[in-house]
């Protein structure tokens, strides 16, 4: 079986979380998906490529499994992040358009197995890297990397901004992390940005964001139109768009890395 998590250790205070770039689906699960499910459309396509090398020394923790196996950015107890709004569950039953993805829906036993086999190892690794980085620097900043189609009526109205910064209304990180990140995004020419809009930070950001112990977390949800040729299969990486976007991502991550030492004594 493919290892559920890939780790690249660095010496920076920044840890990049990559919960949704994986495409691995074990055969016994794949046979239960319907044709729509087999498309694996709901993926943060190429995000690990987009961020590769953007910040020297950053640690990366990447889930290799697809979110249809189990969603690494959901509460393992199944609690909704956005009560009253359409969303997808710990093991999604539908895609982002609200369409069924299973011929044979997962049972409670299936979900428990997947949580233990995929979800738990990813978060064990992520927690360990945050602890390692925090022990080294006295502070750790988790930057959770995401992307999504910019138009999904089932999930949100209208067109999503290009940069969607989430801090759960300022609770998951020091205010300067939120402020500096938002300023860079809002000043990026040709891009739109929002702070704590539709995406306020997923379970990962909320779970690990503990400023009181010098462990900070922030989520970046990018509109896929910023770096893909089109927001549809075959989900082609656009080198020109990506290169332009990477300059802004590099500025964000370098700014946060430079800020980190000043955060050590604030808890």
Image (cartoon, helix red, strand yellow):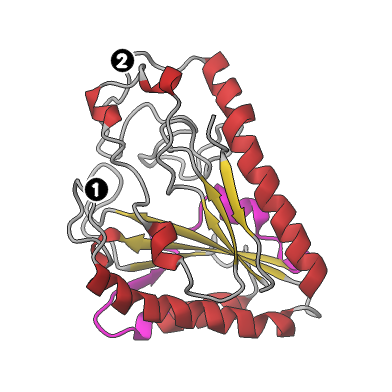
Residue 237 quadrant? bottom left
Residue in the image at 56% along x and 26% along y: 114
Region rendered in magenta = 185-214
From where the camera sits, is residue 63 visible?
yes
Q: Report the side of 209 relative to 101 (left or right).
A: right
Residue 16 quadrant? bottom right
Q: Report the side of 194 relative to 154 (left or right).
A: right
Which of labels 1 and 2 is toward the front? 2
Residue beneath disc 1: 152
Q: Report the side of 247 relative to 96 (left or right).
A: right
**229 is higher (above) or lower (below) than 113:** below
> Would you say residue 205 sits in the magenta stretch?
yes
**Of residues 215 and 81, the one drawn nearer to the viewer in this rendering:** 215
Task: Locate the C terminus and report the quarter of the image it occupies.
Answer: bottom right
Question: Percent x, y for residue 192?
Answer: 29, 74
Say few, some or many: other residues with alpha carbon within 10 Å of mark 2 (under 14 / 14 to 19 / 20 or more). few
């Amino acid at each position: 079986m493919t290892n559920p998590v890939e780790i690249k250790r660095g010496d920076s205070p920044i840890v990049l979380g990559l919960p949704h770039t994986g495409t691995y689906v074990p055969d016994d699960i794949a046979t239960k998906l319907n044709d729509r499910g087999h498309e694996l459309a709901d993926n943060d396509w190429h995000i690990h490529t987009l961020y590769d090398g953007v910040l020297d020394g950053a640690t990366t923790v990447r889930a290799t499994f697809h979110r249809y196996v189990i969603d690494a950015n959901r509460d393992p107890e199944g609690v909704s992040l956005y009560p009253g709004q359409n969303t997808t569950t710990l093991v999604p039953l539908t895609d982002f358009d609200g369409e069924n993805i299973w011929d044979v829906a997962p049972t409670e036993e299936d979900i428990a197995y997947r949580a233990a086999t995929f979800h738990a190892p990813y978060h064990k690794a992520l927690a360990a890297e945050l602890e390692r980085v925090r022990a080294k620097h006295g502070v750790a900043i988790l930057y959770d990397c995401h992307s999504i189609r910019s138009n999904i009526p089932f999930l949100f109205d209208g067109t999503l901004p290009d940069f969607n910064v989430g801090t759960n209304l300022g609770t998951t990180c020091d205010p300067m992390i939120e402020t500096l990140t938002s300023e860079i995004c809002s000043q990026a020419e040709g891009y739109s940005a929002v702070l704590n809009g539709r995406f306020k930070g997923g379970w990962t950001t909320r779970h690990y964001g503990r400023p009181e112990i010098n462990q900070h977390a922030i989520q970046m949800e990018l509109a896929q139109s910023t770096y893909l040729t089109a927001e549809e299969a075959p989900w082609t990486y656009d080198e020109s768009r990506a290169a332009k976007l990477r300059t802004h991502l590099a500025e964000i991550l370098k700014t946060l890395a430079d800020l980190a030492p000043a955060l050590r004594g604030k808890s």
